[in-house]
Image (cartoon, rainbow, N blue to C red):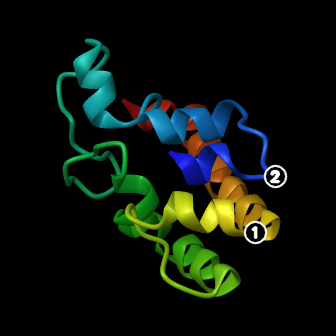
């Protein structure tokens, strides 16, 4: 928390908030609020929790590889916040990745 609060860069926008809170177009959240009957990912059939699309889903593999090349190391649930807080450029890269996934999933409406 100290790292997050002490950062000198990075605005939190809608898509980043959706990612950080695990809300939005993921099967687990949509099932929890009664909008879907299944928490499975519509792209691969695995459990679609808040981290699935960002860190695991095969659909986003190419984007995830590009993200990791641009950031310079693997991006994991354990280090995402640390990386974002380290440098503004890393913040921007990770935020753009989140924006792409959140917006694409919302636009597609999870094809449910």
Residue hosting label 1: 87
Which residue is more in the foreground, 108 or 106? 106
**Residue 97 position by quadrant:** bottom right
Assign the C terminus to one quadrant of the image: top left
Q: Residue at x 20, y 48 (%)?
A: 47
Which residue is more in the foreground, 7 or 71? 7
Residue hosting label 2: 9
Tell me, yes or no, if residue 23 can be seen here.
yes
Q: Position of residue 37 (x, y in %)?
A: 18, 22
Q: Are marks 2 and 1 in contact (CB under 8 Å)?
A: yes
Q: Residue at x 25, y 12 (%)?
A: 34
Q: Position of residue 81 (x, y in %)?
A: 54, 57
Badge 2, how many Cα within 10 Å: few under 14, some, many 20+? some
Q: Is residue 29 above or below residue 62?
A: above
Instruction: Give the structural element (helix, strand or loop) at label 1.
Output: loop
Relative horizontal placement of residue 107, taking residue 1 as reference (left or right): right
Q: Residue at x 30, y 35 (%)?
A: 27
Q: Position of residue 25 (x, y in %)?
A: 45, 33
Q: Earlier in the sequence, mark 2 or mark 1?
A: 2
Q: Is residue 29 above or below residue 5?
A: above
Q: Residue at x 50, y 45 (%)?
A: 1
């Amino acid at each position: 928390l100290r790292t997050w609060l002490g950062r000198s860069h990075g605005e939190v926008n809608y898509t980043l908030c959706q990612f950080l809170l695990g809300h939005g177009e993921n099967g687990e959240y949509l099932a929890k609020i009664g909008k879907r009957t299944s928490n499975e990912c519509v792209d691969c059939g695995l459990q679609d929790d808040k981290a699935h699309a960002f860190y695991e889903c095969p659909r986003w593999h190419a984007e995830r590889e590009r993200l990791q090349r641009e950031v310079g190391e693997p991006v994991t649930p354990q280090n995402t916040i640390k990386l974002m807080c380290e440098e503004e450029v890393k913040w921007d890269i990770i935020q753009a990745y989140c924006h792409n996934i959140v917006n694409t999933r919302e636009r597609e409406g999870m094809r449910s």
